[in-house]
Image (cartoon, rainbow, N blue to C red):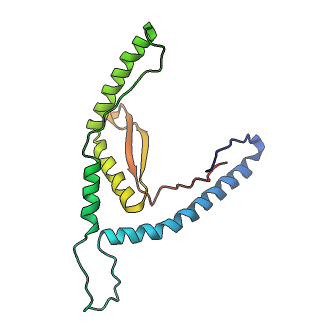
Amino acid sequence: MATAQRTDVPADDNLAVAGRIHGLWQHANDHMRERHERWRKAYRLIHNRGWANTRDPWMPSPTASEIYPIISALVGWMTDQRVRFQVVPAADPHSQYANFQQKLSADLETVLDSLWVNYNYESEVEKVLFDAFVYGTGFFKSVYDPGLDGGAGNATMRRCDPFTAVSYTHLTL
């Protein structure tokens, strides 16, 4: 298991830090390239494109995908129950501050429930679960989008395509 260690870098050593970051990115990119061929093969199997173009016409070539309906049913089964948020304050009980924190926690639960429904996070979860079944991993990206809510902005959660996400456990400075 990789552990992250922070190292202080002198201000005049920015070029060396940039070179090290580029080296880590290149290493992660090489690591992801190894996965991409396996993921492409899984995608072709799911969409029933696993047969070679040089396949003889007399050999069977089923056109109905058997994998896609199974994965679709699993995603439906996993999202069958609705997500329930529960926010618990971390405060000493039976105090005025704890009562205040409890009211804030109840408000936060309401806000999270409304965001879940209004921004349709259920569909994002379905996409990530589908990615997890097909590629073995799924990614969420949580960002602040200033264009939401008529320009007022809000936090949002989106699916990140596994082919564009760089994930490597040894990426530490």
Q: Which residue: 69% across, 41% down?
A: 6
24 vs 125, left or right, is: right
Q: Is residue 116 left or right of residue 101?
A: left
Q: Is residue 93 above or below residue 126?
A: above
Quadrant in the picture for residue 73: bottom left
Q: Residue furthest top?
A: 96
Q: 30 above or below 97?
A: below
Q: Is residue 61 above or below residue 172?
A: below
Question: Which residue occupies 38% across, 17% down?
Answer: 102
Question: Residue most toward the left?
Answer: 64
User: Residue sitting at 26 percent across and 82 percent down?
Assistant: 61
Front residue of 141 and 78 = 78
Percent position (x, y) of residue 160? 41, 52
How many discs mark residues in the rendered view? 0
Residue 21: horizontal and vertical position, in percent? 65, 53
Judged left or right of residue 71, residue 36 is right
Residue 108 falls in image quadrant? top left
79 over 29 or under it: above or below? above
| Residue shown at 72% from the left, 42% from the top | 7
